[in-house]
């Protein structure tokens, strides 16, 4: 146990009432008891380099949709570590883990594990089991014990798709003296824009590179008239009437105060008569609350419910499953970006726009300010407020030409922004090539690496 562990103890005690309310699994893995992952063995080929990628939850996991296949094609074994139960489920669904015994030379496997708590003993056990050659942290998640232990083992750590919001930055600055060494230990920080770059430098990161956002590449555009496999079945299972308009709201959240209506209640009231509404709350613990906000069990159909439990003519739907939001978006006439009508700083708007769905956002999108600004400038997204939402939805439903124009503008906008994932893949390949040999006896006993570290290629910031 070190001084940092001692500091974590009172923090854990203070937050215990919050995390104890939530059902969480995998406690052994959270304390670093991860099953050891052996190196794949091929008699005529060396073991591939192993990259650990930490993606906290569903949003960060989705960012990896294009990157992981690129890395595998480059001969890199990928270990995806997620913190939340939903993140783990999404990673397993998205990447279809390849058992090491079935991995082929030139096409290494993908393994999904739970990320450990940042206690020194947990981190040590976790790294002993994973034995990565390098580690990449999605967006931020710079945990001091993890970064310090990786440095002790000569495992380079980088931030990719880096993001440090203004609110988070203010909090980090209060502890800058304590956190700066962790930022300074980063091999590099590849960040989304110049504002984030300046904040990373202020926190102590030495090598900061502006790469754009990988979220632009993580979507799979849908051609006009194309239907996603599984979308028709989802509609049939829920009882969605394809002849009636459907609004789909993704990653919805509670109201800005306990007394204020939730986003689901706001949308329920704002939907024009005869319009169907499907909501996918960001937090599973809000499923029951959402059903109540959408008119109760008599009116709202849960995805998890059997057909026998369905109301006779449903027009409200709860998507209480993992990995089906994209299918639901593809069925929509209008998509609404959740957490933008509250004080929760927004959700990613790229997915529904890539599917060609006219998309509405509320005024609070601080976490995706740069992305939202690009869409707003291109007239590819429709802004609204809680007060204007009923009129906005009614106008869009009555104007198919406007919805088609939004779809064209959105697809064009996304295509113009893509490319950051390939840049990240190049930087990570170089990081693995230049990783120094480790001094820890339990790490990389079966692989070698050059000792030099040349500067990696990166985009100019001009």
Image: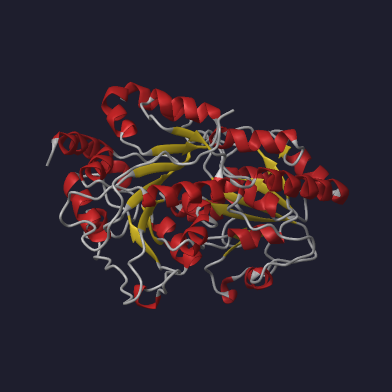
x and y, in percent, of residue 286 in the image: 47, 51
**For residue 183, which quarter of the picture?**
top left
Q: Is residue 112 left or right of residue 74?
A: left
Q: Quadrant of the N terminus?
A: top left
Q: Is residue 129 above or below residue 136?
A: below
Using the rendered image of the protein, determine whether residue 67 is visible from the camera's viewpoint: yes
* Residue located farthest toward the left when viewing the structure as drawn: 1
Q: Is residue 102 left or right of residue 70?
A: left
Q: Is residue 83 left or right of residue 62?
A: left
x and y, in percent, of residue 200 in the image: 42, 29
What residue is shown at x 69% (from left), y 57% (from top)?
221
Judge by depth and name the residue closer to the eye, 55 or 151: 151
What residue is shown at x 38% (from left), y 42% (from top)?
158
Q: Is residue 184 above or below residue 233?
A: above
x and y, in percent, of residue 75 in the image: 44, 63
What residue is shown at x 47% (from left), y 49% (from top)?
60
Using the rendered image of the protein, determine whether residue 383 is visible from the camera's viewpoint: no
Judge by depth and name the residue closer to the eye, 228 or 109: 109
Judge by depth and name the residue closer to the eye, 154 or 124: 154
Colour logic: secondary structure
Q: Is residue 182 left or right of residue 254?
A: left
């Amino acid at each position: 146990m070190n001084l940092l562990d001692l500091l974590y103890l009172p923090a854990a005690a203070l937050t215990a009432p919050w995390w104890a309310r939530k059902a969480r699994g995998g406690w052994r893995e959270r304390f670093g008891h991860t099953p050891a992952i052996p190196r794949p063995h091929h008699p005529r080929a060396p073991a591939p380099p192993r990259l650990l990628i930490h993606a906290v939850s569903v949003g960060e996991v989705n960012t990896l949709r294009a990157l992981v296949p690129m890395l595998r094609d480059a001969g890199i074994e990928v270990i995806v570590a997620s913190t939340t139960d939903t993140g783990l489920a999404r990673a397993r669904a998205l990447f279809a883990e390849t058992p090491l015994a079935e991995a082929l030379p030139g096409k290494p496997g993908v393994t999904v594990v739970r990320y450990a708590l940042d206690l020194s003993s947990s981190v040590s056990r976790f790294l002993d089991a994973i034995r990565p050659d390098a580690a990449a942290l999605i967006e931020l998640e710079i945990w001091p014990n993890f970064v310090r232990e990786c440095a002790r083992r000569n495992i380079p750590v980088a931030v990719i798709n880096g993001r440090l919001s203004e609110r988070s930055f203010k909090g980090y600055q209060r502890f800058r003296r304590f956190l700066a060494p962790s930022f300074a230990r980063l091999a590099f920080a590849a960040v989304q824009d110049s504002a984030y770059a300046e904040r990373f430098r202020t926190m102590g990161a030495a090598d900061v590179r502006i790469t754009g956002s990988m979220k632009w590449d993580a979507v799979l555009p849908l051609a006009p008239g194309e239907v996603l496999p599984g979308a028709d079945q989802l509609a049939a299972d829920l009882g969605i009437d394809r002849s009636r308009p459907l609004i789909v709201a993704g990653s919805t959240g509670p109201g800005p105060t306990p007394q204020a209506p939730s986003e689901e209640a706001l949308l329920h009231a704002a939907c024009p008569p005869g319009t169907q509404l499907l909501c996918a709350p960001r937090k599973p613990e809000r499923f029951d609350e959402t059903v109540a906000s959408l008119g109760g069990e008599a009116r709202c159909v849960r995805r998890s419910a059997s057909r026998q439990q369905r109301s006779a003519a449903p027009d409200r739907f709860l998507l209480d499953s993992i990995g089906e939001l994209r299918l639901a978006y593809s069925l929509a006439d209008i998509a609404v970006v959740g957490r933008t009508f509250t004080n929760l700083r927004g959700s990613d708007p790229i997915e529904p726009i890539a599917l060609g769905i006219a998309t509405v956002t509320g005024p609070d999108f601080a976490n995706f300010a740069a992305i939202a600004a690009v869409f707003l400038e291109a007239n590819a997204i429709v802004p609204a407020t809680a007060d204007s939402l009923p009129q906005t939805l009614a106008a869009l439903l009555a104007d198919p030409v406007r919805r088609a124009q939004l779809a064209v503008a959105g697809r064009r906008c996304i295509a113009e922004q893509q490319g950051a994932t390939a840049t990240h893949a190049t930087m990570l390949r170089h990081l693995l090539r230049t990783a120094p040999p480790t001094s820890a006896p339990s790490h990389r006993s079966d692989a070698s690496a050059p000792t030099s570290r040349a500067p990696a290629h990166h985009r100019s910031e001009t």
